[in-house]
Amino acid sequence: MHDILCSISMKETRKEIVRSDLACFLCVCRLNKDKVRVFSAVGVLGLIKSAIDIDAAVFSSSDLFVCTSCYKKLIRFQMIASSLRALQRELKENYEKGGLRT
């Protein structure tokens, strides 16, 4: 009987741990079914690294998630960063074509 109670309480504890892990890696909001798994989505680790300079790969858990709101912000960050690089490249090319040099 004691073994049954121990196994039941262990299962309940495990469920609580799983529930507590279902929080966004970035904003710590509680996650519902709309989430993105950090280690399976292409490029999410790199986006997190470039956006906030945190290497999420050092965390041993492969159950890291980001909420859809933070994921959309990461995608927006990527698009803006890409636009800035394109603008920088264009300005550099203009300078190299004939910018004023002293």
Image (cartoon, rainbow, N blue to C red):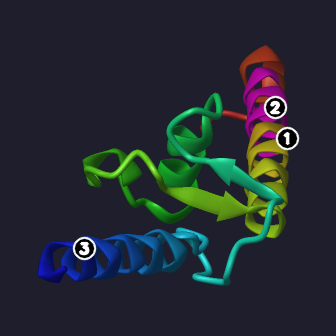
Identify the residue at image location x=53%, y=68%: 25
Labels 2 and 3: the sequence-earlier one = 3
Q: Residues within 10 Å of mark 1 (few under 14, many from 20)?
A: few
Residues 30 and 17: in front is 17
For label 1, the SS is helix
Residue 69 spot, x, y in % from top left: 83, 68
Labels 1 and 3: the sequence-earlier one = 3
Q: Residue furthest left?
A: 2
Asked whether 96 falls inside the magenta stretch, the response is no
Q: Relative to 28, does residue 64 appear above or below in the rendering?
A: above
Residues 34 and 16: in front is 16
Asked whether 91 falls inside the magenta stretch, the response is yes
Residue 77 spot, x, y in % from top left: 76, 55
On the picture, is 52 further left or further right than 32? Answer: left
Residue 40 spot, x, y in % from top left: 57, 33
Picture disc at residue 86: 2
Identify the residue at image location x=80%, y=48%: 75
Q: CA distance from mark 1 to mark 3?
A: 60 Å
Query: Is there a contact, CB below 8 Å, between mark 2 and mark 1?
Result: yes
On the picture, is 68 further left or further right than 24? Answer: right
For label 3, the SS is helix
Q: Residues within 10 Å of mark 2 (few under 14, many from 20)?
A: few
Please tell me whether mark 2 or mark 3 is closer to you in this view: 3
Residue 21 spot, x, y in % from top left: 47, 71
Please tell me whether mark 1 or mark 3 is closer to you in this view: 3
The segment highlighted magenta reads 84-93
Q: CA distance from mark 2 to mark 3?
A: 63 Å
For label 2, the SS is helix
- The residue to which callout 3 is attached is 4
- The residue to which callout 1 is attached is 83
Residues 72 and 14: in front is 14
Q: Residues within 10 Å of mark 3 (few under 14, many from 20)?
A: few
